[in-house]
Structures are given as structure tokens and as C-alpha cells.
Amino acid sequence: MEKSKVYFTKDLTSDGLLKIYEALGRELKGNVAVKISTGEPGGHNFLNPKFIEPLVKKTKWDNC
């Protein structure tokens, strides 16, 4: 079984996530899972879901 690739960034912006997607060098088609740990509301590391919205929109119906 091929191991999954994991991408990291220190650019914690929506644009930073889009740059990771672009680093793949290909468009993802079909069902795409976006797995990001956003923490819990009130916690020190909570990420607002709006943070990943541009990435989800980019991968959603654009490539089906």
C-alpha cells in the first residue's frame, strides 16, 4: 500500500492552504476529503471553519 503524503505550512491563512493544494501539481477529481484539525471553540488553537472555506470551494464541484 502506498503511504499518504502529508503537507504542512507555516502560512496559517486561507491562501497558505490554497498554496498547498497547488503544490500537488494536479487537480483532484471526484470526492475530495479535506482533513484539518480545527481544535475546539474556546481552545487556544481553534481555527474558524471560514479558514478552510476557500480550499473546500476550490475542490468541491469545480473538478467533478
Image (cartoon, rainbow, N blue to C red):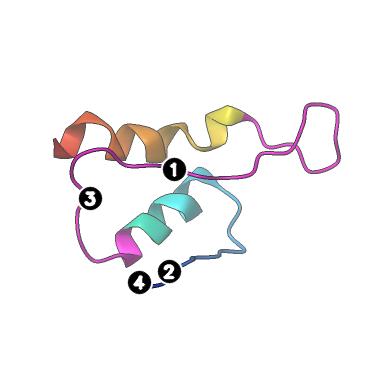
Q: Is residue 51 within the magenta segment? A: no
Hey, what amino acid is under mark 2? Lys
Q: Is residue 17 left or right of residue 43?
A: left
Residue 12, image x, y percentages: 61, 52
How many numbered badges does the structure rendering display? 4
Kindly indicate the quadrant of the structure image that contains residue 9: bottom right
Residue type at numbered disc 4: Met
Task: Identify the residue position indicated by label 4 in the image.
Answer: 1
The residue where tag 3 is placed is: 28
Magenta range is 22-48
Image depth: mark 4 or mark 2 in front? 4
Tag 1: amino acid: Val
Residue at 47% over, 51% down:
17
The Cα–Cα distance between marks 2 and 1, rounded to whole angstroms, is: 13 Å
Point 13% across, 35% down: residue: 64
Q: Which mark is residue 5?
A: 2
Q: CA distance from mark 3 to mark 1?
A: 11 Å
Q: Main secondary structure of the magenta part?
A: loop
Which quarter of the figure has residue 54? Answer: top left
Q: Percent position (x, y) of residue 22?
A: 31, 59
Would residue 20 appear left or right of 51 to someone viewing this image?
left
